[in-house]
Structures are given as C-alpha cells and as structure tokens.
Amino acid sequence: WSPADALPVCLTSPTVAILGSGDFSRSLALRLVASGVRVVVGSRCVNRIPSGLFPDAVELRNQEGAVSQAVCLVFMAVFPEHYCSLLGLQSALAGKVLVDVSNGAEMNIHGPSNAERLAELFPDSLVVKGFNTVSTWELQTGAHDGSRQVMICSNSTEGKKKVVQLARQMGFHPVDMGGLSAAREIEVAPLRLFPSWSGPVVVTFLLFLFFYGYGFLRGILLPFLAQGGHNAFYRLALDLVNESLPAVALVTLALVYFPGLFAAWLQLWRGTKYQRFPSWLDNWLQRRKQLGLLSFLCAALHGVYSLCLPLRRITLHSVSLKVPHKSSEPWDELGVWRSDLYLSCGVLGLGVLSLLAITSLPTVGNTLNWREFTFVQSGLGYIALTLSIMHTLFFGWDFAFHIEAYPFYMPPSYLLAVVVPCIVLVCRCFLLLPCIFTRLTRIRRGWESKLSQLCIDSKLRSIPQF
Amino acid sequence: WSPADALPVCLTSPTVAILGSGDFSRSLALRLVASGVRVVVGSRCVNRIPSGLFPDAVELRNQEGAVSQAVCLVFMAVFPEHYCSLLGLQSALAGKVLVDVSNGAEMNIHGPSNAERLAELFPDSLVVKGFNTVSTWELQTGAHDGSRQVMICSNSTEGKKKVVQLARQMGFHPVDMGGLSAAREIEVAPLRLFPSWSGPVVVTFLLFLFFYGYGFLRGILLPFLAQGGHNAFYRLALDLVNESLPAVALVTLALVYFPGLFAAWLQLWRGTKYQRFPSWLDNWLQRRKQLGLLSFLCAALHGVYSLCLPLRRITLHSVSLKVPHKSSEPWDELGVWRSDLYLSCGVLGLGVLSLLAITSLPTVGNTLNWREFTFVQSGLGYIALTLSIMHTLFFGWDFAFHIEAYPFYMPPSYLLAVVVPCIVLVCRCFLLLPCIFTRLTRIRRGWESKLSQLCIDSKLRSIPQF
Amino acid sequence: WSPADALPVCLTSPTVAILGSGDFSRSLALRLVASGVRVVVGSRCVNRIPSGLFPDAVELRNQEGAVSQAVCLVFMAVFPEHYCSLLGLQSALAGKVLVDVSNGAEMNIHGPSNAERLAELFPDSLVVKGFNTVSTWELQTGAHDGSRQVMICSNSTEGKKKVVQLARQMGFHPVDMGGLSAAREIEVAPLRLFPSWSGPVVVTFLLFLFFYGYGFLRGILLPFLAQGGHNAFYRLALDLVNESLPAVALVTLALVYFPGLFAAWLQLWRGTKYQRFPSWLDNWLQRRKQLGLLSFLCAALHGVYSLCLPLRRITLHSVSLKVPHKSSEPWDELGVWRSDLYLSCGVLGLGVLSLLAITSLPTVGNTLNWREFTFVQSGLGYIALTLSIMHTLFFGWDFAFHIEAYPFYMPPSYLLAVVVPCIVLVCRCFLLLPCIFTRLTRIRRGWESKLSQLCIDSKLRSIPQF
C-alpha cells in the first residue's frame, strides 16, 4: 500500500515483543508470525513454558531480553494488575510503543482505564490501546475476518500510526477512536452483553407479560372468583403461554414496520430527506432486525406449542371424555373451512418469516443486491404481516360478534393484538396511493419542497453556529 | 503488492473528492477514511449538512472547492438526472477520473447508460463506472466482505487502473469488465431480482399447479360431477395442498440429480470431457442448488401440514364422528408397520435434506474440502432421494394394486410423482457398475477415447477457424 | 507490506504459466487475472480448448511456449500420473519455481508424495507444494474467503517466498508448513472426511445402540419370551427409536459440559493453569461443538417423532380402540400438569439448543464478543441442560418409585440417561461455591499456588532438558 519510503524503519525489519505467555500472547504470536513478523516473547520464567506452546519461529526470552530485542513495538499481554511488576523495565521501554491489549475487569464507569494507568507507570513510552476486542480464536484462525475491526486509540500519533500499520499487515481493519481517554470505552466493549438486543428483548418481554396477565385475569382468575369452584389453573403452563405468544409475535412484527412508516410520514411532512430523524426513531429503525427475529421466535414457539397441545389431549384421554357427548353434532363444513384457512395462513406466514430470518444471517444477506434485499425485507415482510393478520382473523371468525366472547367486558387477547398490525397495514396501503407514492419517491431522490427550504434557511440564519 | 514507483503520484497523497452528500456519499467517505484516504465532500449547500453526519476527518466544501482539492479522483455520488447541473465544473474536472457510482433507474435495455451520458457531458474527463453494486451497508461495516467484488469498466486504461488500486486499498476485489459499453449491464445488475432463482421457481410452481390441478380433477371435481351431491371442496385449502407438496418435492429433488446423470452419460458417449455441454445442460447444472432448496422447502411445508392435519381433526371432532363405526376393526399390526415405516423414512429424509440445506449456506460450505462437499451433496443427496422414494412407496403400500385406487382410470398423484425419481435412482445405480464407473473415472481424469479424438480432429480439420 | 526493493524482479512484471487446461487451470487463471497477474496457459493441443473457456486476457500457447514466457513461476495443473510426459520441458523449466497443485489419489501413507516425485523428475527446478486445498469454486468466486488459508511447503526458501507473495496477492492467507516432506500431509488434507466429526459421531452412535438395545431387551424381547404371545415388535420402527433418541441427546449434552468441569478440577488440584491438559482431555474439549450439534440433532429428531406419533394413533384408530374402556376415568388434573410441564420444558430446552446451534454457525459466532460467546455457550448451555433434565424428570414423575417400572429389575432408560447430566449439574453448582469460584478465578488469571510451583521447580531440576 503505502510506498516504501513512508514505512517507518522499525516495520521493514519488524521484531515485535510480547510480554506475557498466556493464551492471548500465544494467539497473538501465531498471527504475527503468519503475517511475516518476527516475534520474541518475554516471560518471567521461560523454563515453565511447555514446549510446543509457541510456534518454532517465536523466540522465547526473559522479559528484559525480549524488550531489548523489540525494535519499537511491545505488546503487554499480562493482566493489568501485574503492570506494576514491570516497573523495572521502565528505562528499557522508554521511547517504545506499548500496546495495551487488556479488557476491563468489570463495567468501569469511574476511575482511569487500564491504558491510562499504564501510561502513568511508563511516562516515557508511547501507550496505544488496541486489539482487546479481538478474541484469541480470531487471532489463531484468521478466517472469515479479513476486515475485522480493531479499535485503536492513543495520545501519540506516531505510536498509533505504527500500530495501525501492523494491524493492517495482520489482516485487521483498524479504526481510529481518538485519544487515550477513549480507552475506557474500548476496554469495556468486550464486556457488553448484546447491547443491540436489550431494548427489543425488554419490549417483547413486557408485551408477553401484558398478554399473559390479561389472559390470566380474563380466562382464569375472574371466572374462578365468579363461579367459585371452577379451577382452570392447569392452563397456566401451556394453554395460556400459547395464547399469549401469537399475540406477542403479531404486535412485535407490527412494531418492525411501524418506524419505517413514521419515517416516511416525517419525510412527507417536512418535504425533505436532509433533516435527521429524532434519535428515538433512529434507534427504533436500527432495532428492526432484532424485533423481527424475536417476533419469529415467538411465532415459531407458538407453532410448536400448537402442535404439542393435541398430543397432550390424546395421551390424557381428556378428549375422549369431552368428545362423546358432542358426537351428535352434524358435520361442520364451515368449521373445516375456518380451521383449514387459519392453519394455512399461519403455516405460510411462519414460512415467510423463516425466509426473512434466514436472510438476516450475515452471509446470506451479503449475497443479495439492494433490490433483492428490499424485496425480501419489505415485500416479504408485509406478506408475512398480512398472512399473520389473516391467520388471526380466520381464527377469530365471527366469534368477535357474539356476546360470550366478552366475559367481564374484556375482549379476547387476539382482538387486542390485531389492532396495531391493522393500523400498520392500512397506513402502508395509504402510502401506496399514487400521489403520495410519487411525492415520497421524489423526496427520497433528493427533491425538496420550497417550504422546507424556506424553513431551514430561516433556521440557519437565526442559529448561524448550528 | 505493486512497488512504489509503479504507484501514480496521486495515490501517494490521495485526496479524493466526492460530489453529493447523500447516504452513499456518507458511507463512501467513511470507508475511504477508514482506508487511510483523505476525503473532501462537495455539496451544493454545505450549511445544510447536519453536523456529525460525516466523520471529522472529512472536509466539507462547496462543489468547486472539493473538485479543486481532488488530486485525480472524483466520485459522482449524485443522482444521474442531476448530472447536467454539474456542467459548470467541466473545466475543473478536465483530466480527472470521474467515478460514476449510479444505478440504473429501471431495466434499461435501450438508450445509453448513465456512465456513457456522463462521458458525453464531460468529454475531457476519464469516466469510470464502478462501486454501484456495493451497498451503503457494506461500505460502512466493511465486515465479512474482504474480497467483495466491485465491477469496473472504462474506456480509459489509466482511469481504470487508478480506480482498481483504490478499490483494492478499500478492501474490495475489483473485476475489470472492459470498456464503457459494459456500463449498462453493470448499472442494471443491482436491479436484478434473484436471476438464478427464476427458472427453478417457475419449474416448481408449474409442477405444483399440475399436481394440484390433477388432484382437484381426480379427487374433487370428477367425483362431484359423477355422484352429484358429494361435496369435498373443503379439501382445497389444506388436504389437496398437502397432497401436491410431497409430489412436487419428490420430482424437484429428482430434477436436481437428473442433469448430473445426463452429463455423465454425455461424457461416456463422447468419450472425452473436453467438449462443452450444451448450454441448456450447463444452465440446469448451475441451478441444482436452487432446485434442491425449493425441494427442501416443499418437503418442510409438507411435514408441517401433515402435523397440522390431525390437529384439525381433533379440534373439529370430525374424527369422533367417523371413528366409532370402525371401532369394531381388529388391531391392524400391518397398518402400524406401514405407518411407522413411512413416517420414519419421511422424517429421516427431511432430516437429511435439512443437512443439505445447511451446508448450502456459504460459510458452512466454505469450511468443507471438496471430498466432504461431494460426500454431502452427492452421497447424502442420494440418501435423501432414496428415503423419499421409500417414504412414498411405504405410504402407497399395496393400494396401487387395488382397482379402487384408479377412479376414472387416473392413478393417484404419488404414483405419478415417483416415476422420475425411480428412473434417476436406477440410472445412478447403472453408473456404479464397475465397467462403466472405471471408464467414467478415466474420462474425468483426462483420458480420451481414440474415437473421440478422431471425431474432433476431423472436425477441427474441416472447420479450421472454429 | 514489504517495501519495493524486497520484491523479486519476476513479480513486478509477473507473467505466470499454467500447464494444463482443465477445470483447476481455468479457475486459477481467472483468479490470477483478477489479481492483476499476466497468465499464459500451456496445453498439449491448444486447438482443442473451446473458445471462451478462458478469459480473454489469458494467452493460450503450447507447453513449450508457455514455459518460455513464464518469468519464474509455473503452475503444474496436470494430473500427477502425466508428470513424466513433461520431461521434455526439463531444461526449459530449470531454475524456475514449479508449483504442484495436485491432490493425493487416495490416502497415501507410504511412498513419496506427488510433489516429491515432481522434484525428482525436475531436479533443477524449485518445487513448491501449494494451492491443492483450494477448490475451483473458491478460486473463481473469491468471495468470503479473504484470508482463506493456503498451505505451502518446499525445500527451496526462495521458491516458497515467491509463492507466498503470489498467494497474498491473490487474496489468500499462505501458511508455511516447512520442507517438502510435509507435502504428503498437504496432499492428503482434501481427502479427509470430517476428521473432527468422527469421534463424536461414533460416541453418539454407540450411545444410540446401547439405549436401543437396552430398550429392545427390556420392553420387547424379555416380555415376549416371558409372556409368550405378546408381540410388540412393531415398536421397533418408531416407538423405540423415539425412546432412545432423547436419552442419547441428554447424555451427549452432558458430555459437552463434562470435560470443562474436569479441566476446572484439574486446574484447582494442580493449583496452576500453566500445565497442559492431558491430550485426551484436550481432544475432548475441542470436540464439544460437534457433540453439542449431535445432541441438538437427536433432540430435534425426538421432537419431530413425538409430534408424529399421535398422528399415527389417529390415522390408525388404535386410539379409539383403547380409549373407550378408559373413558370412565375421572379428569386427571395432576396428569395435565405433568404433561404440560414436561412439554414446556422440552420445547423450551429444544428452543435454547436451537439458539446454541445457530450461534455455532461461523458468521453468527464471529459477531459475538467473548462475553456474549461465554454467555451463550456456557450460560445458555447449562440452561438447556437443566431444562432437559427437568423435561425427563417431569416425564418420569413418580413412576420411578413404583415397582412396575422395573420389569426384570431393569430401570427405564430415561432413568439411566439422567444420571450423567445430574452429576454434571451438581459438579457445576459445586464449582459455583464462593471459596472454590474465587480460587479458580485467581488461577485462571495467572495466580499459582506455592505447592504447584515447588512441584514444577523440583521436576524441572530433576529433568533439566525437559
């Protein structure tokens, strides 16, 4: 890439030292050797390292020896609590780049980061934070991560430059995060637990709690209190869960498509696409994939539970208890149509959702061009939503018009669940009206209404520093 | 890589300009900055760009300022209908490389491509087509796409060379598509909707129509007409679909293995592997993965529907209506064996098909060596085919020998569906005969029969220019 | 990368020759051309190559012409049995690097490798083994394999260096395997059939055989012999399989977590983490993913079979035969709770296992940081194990305390299957005790007990060369 004369001398004959002989040190050494870098590992007691742990090309020395061999780069692969034990190397490390690869011990909100403490201990060295987000497994295999991001920060531009070059040589994709004060955030990054999932999971869980609680009140607790002895608590384990899951799945699926409609409406109203969305809408738009997968999960569980329930009825003979005294009923053809239609819609809807879930796998999604992606995510998504609504409506059939469906004046939960999806579907159809569709397309291609330009210009004039 | 003196001056201090400030411009700027390139973005009204939209390292200028800063490369990230509005920059852009990143608006079959129109407007610039197949998401993340292809074409070798180098620096895998006349095809590429799927989907759909229509005629319409009142139209929604799906799945699976057999037979007959297959066979061979996945889809749907049907019978009590008057039948052990065997074969066949579907995921398939791949795709594939045929035959049992199975002289659809798979299986066993197998292996390792050499030599002599 | 002056002259104007015109030759040529390398293909009979088979940038010559054009690198893309036919080129190839890309014909344990035979035939050339593990498909697409490993070995350092550079230029990740004697292993690598799967598959299969045989003895053969006529052999096809599968799944899942506990215990006992584990434990630890996936497979099959069984009962009316004379039983609410709870635990356990299986896909796993990975693989894994055990215990309910559950003094198989998982779970809880947990954490962060240091020091002193 960069021409030869731009390369610092230390990288043309790059001997890099690693202090410490743990798992990370070993994996780092493997990767460095595979990238054509000479590596010397420094350990407190070299004799204790099992033979064969490091590749043959790696030289094992004591810590002083390793540091003296390093031309300019030294990786600190020891636990941060042992940094003080290296104070004796202070003069040997002076002027060299120290790469701090440690993770935070726990979510460190106050107090200095490991890298900052290291910089205090070795004021004459150039401390660079980096590589802590890379796992030992990724270092060893180097497969499928050709452009894996490595976050780097330092107060020393010179040191950062060298580490960036080395990271590129190792096949990583270095990302400059700024000064050493950013180290805390980088150190904490590997401790975060699915940050993009927490919101959607909480929403889904709250929806489940609501529908479960509502169903419990309406179907079990109130009838029990009203009629005394009629005990239906056995429905808690399976029946009620299977009643709540589809409602949650349906509402969550609607929540996937709601922010897109809202964004379209905002663009129409503002008459331009050059104004940023409010941050809550931005966040919501970025969580659609997670919401969709959670909706799929609930729908799949609902499918499995629905298949399990007849299993129970058969094995428990409870069916045979109830069936006989109904056997005088005539053949209910309308009932067959209803059940067949709601089963078909349900199965097909779940099938389409599965396709959506498969295309959300990174490698599958990567092979699609944007038109295919739009077709799958938006086209198939609305088909799934429509099928799910039809599944619910066919299930409900005409029971919603009977007074018995409203015990204690509470509508059945599927009626509650179908409200938001129906609104989403109607709004979507509204956006497809020719006049609105044309205007929206024009806005998305960069056109702006005169009004919006005026608004913004006057805003700019009144707040010139904005 | 290439030595320093081969690098054009403009890339050793590469300031690249991007005209336009939309989503694509922003993502392109992010990626360029991450690749170590200095970027200046030119916009009609710089004040209107929200702060924070572009990374700090990016300089924002008006269009003239941006172009004047660019050493040699300018990206045109504006909609092609606005190209004319840039005519004022004609002299500033002279001698520079203009990269056209636009997509076609619709399937453009006649008329010049956007890149050709751009070349007409700026005759003194070197217009290069490229990067339009890359999505903004891929530009931003840069993950998992280390060698993502970027198709590039231009009439200027010099311009193409510079763009190729930049694309490599950004971590893409540039592919030279030739002169600017290839731009139309490149522009249309992102508009194509699953080009490799259309054929297999049409075939599967036609098969489904055939089996559904046949089943409708045989099981519903003709009996209705013949017996008057007997109305079985309720079977349309679920029963008949579930009768057609397995037939479609079976035939489609056979179609996956048919072209391979045909190719083997062609090689045996010609006595050489150095003659190309006819193009229809080539196309068919390239669509086997899609056919296999569609077969899996149908089989999976059939499995789910088969599990749903008893659910309906229980909830609708229709079982209890029919069962009683048969309850005097003795315990039918043969029937138990039959049903257990066809269920086992079906479940195992679907399981093997699932494994095949999983290995068709890019990342899973990538980890296999060719022997493992052959084992899975060919070995497991034929096992799945055999299990499916057995599933069908066990389902059919001995009913095919009864006259009642042929109302209106029409055989049941599973009998029709099993014909092609059986032929495929027999042909495959035929190819495993030692004498044929040895000859085929020799041909595939490069051996040629004397006869085929004579044929070809005489052909070559008679048509020397071929 | 390396500075310009380190590049050999032959790569600055790199014309590379490929001998042979088969599939591999074609794919190799495509990739080389796409990487900016000039390619000339040498074939015995150039006229026989169909037009369009090779890209236009590739020059087609006879073998002598191709070799003479190659500056220093010649790929041997012919079958190894035809190497002798190239002896005439011996002098033309002298001093050039010959890259042997052939695979072994069969598992070659004795005898020289293809590369060694080639080196004997061309003693004046520098023979390098490599690229045989790359498939033609990977060469052509070049997608998703940015850092795909290419194993290379040679006795010539100079030759190896050139091939390593070319491999990097082509987007591969070359791995130096040492001298030419390593060629045999490299040639055999593509012939290996799922080496990491053989152990786990054998274990799972033996477990299945054991439980199937045990169930056959206990439930079918012994009752048949004891009671004479009572024939339950029809249970072989489905019932017994479905009884054995969950037992296998449960034990296999326990085997996934067993070695981790053993390793922890070993570290606690030794008081250090710097001693290597015995190799059988190392192997076991590396096979956990495969064991887990096999456990998931068995559990999923068990789920499907369990859903299929009521299907059979309904279609065969055997239910209606048995049910009536039990219809006088009272409503068994305890039974409903039991069945609902074991169904719930089973479904949820299988759901959690599915999540685990999905995260074992390479691309999904790559997006997790180590804390998320630990949470999924260890946290969710133990949840799945607990749910599976609860599923089994709820299924068993109180029947284990009845004498009828022990015909012929043989306990039911689910009792046998639940033993190992319970041990694993108890051990795991034991490791979570505060005193043990703290000590283990300290050991894993590098702390060592005095005792262990003494032990090792004395060992080191007594066996100084170790």
Image (tube, coloured by chain):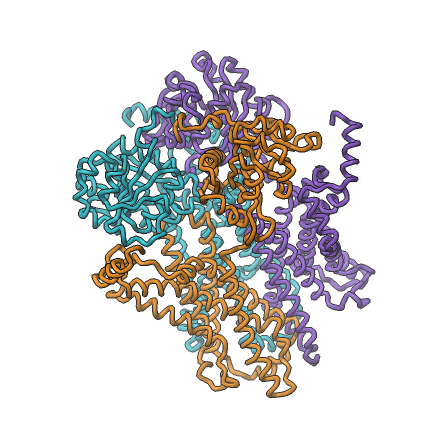
Chain colours: A orange, B cyan, C purple
Is residue B371 among the parts visible in the rendering? no
Which image quarter is the C terminus of chain C in? top right
| Residue at image point 72% right, 56% down | C429
Which image quarter is the N terminus of chain C in? top left
Position of residue B38 in the picture relative to residue A166 (left or right)? left
Q: Which residue ends up furthest to the bottom in the rendered image?
A: A227
Position of residue B68 in the picture relative to residue B142 (left or right)? left
Which of the 4 quarters of the picture holds residue B283?
top left
B114, A176: nearer the viewer: A176
Q: Residue B430, image x and y in percent? A: 52, 40
Q: Residue B122, image x and y in percent? A: 18, 39
Q: Residue B395, image x and y in percent? A: 55, 59
Which of the 4 quarters of the picture holds residue C19?
top left
Q: Residue A362, image x and y in percent? A: 46, 49
| Residue at image point 59% right, 84% down | A223
A329, A413: nearer the viewer: A413
Instruction: State whether residue A343 is above or below residue C351.
Output: below
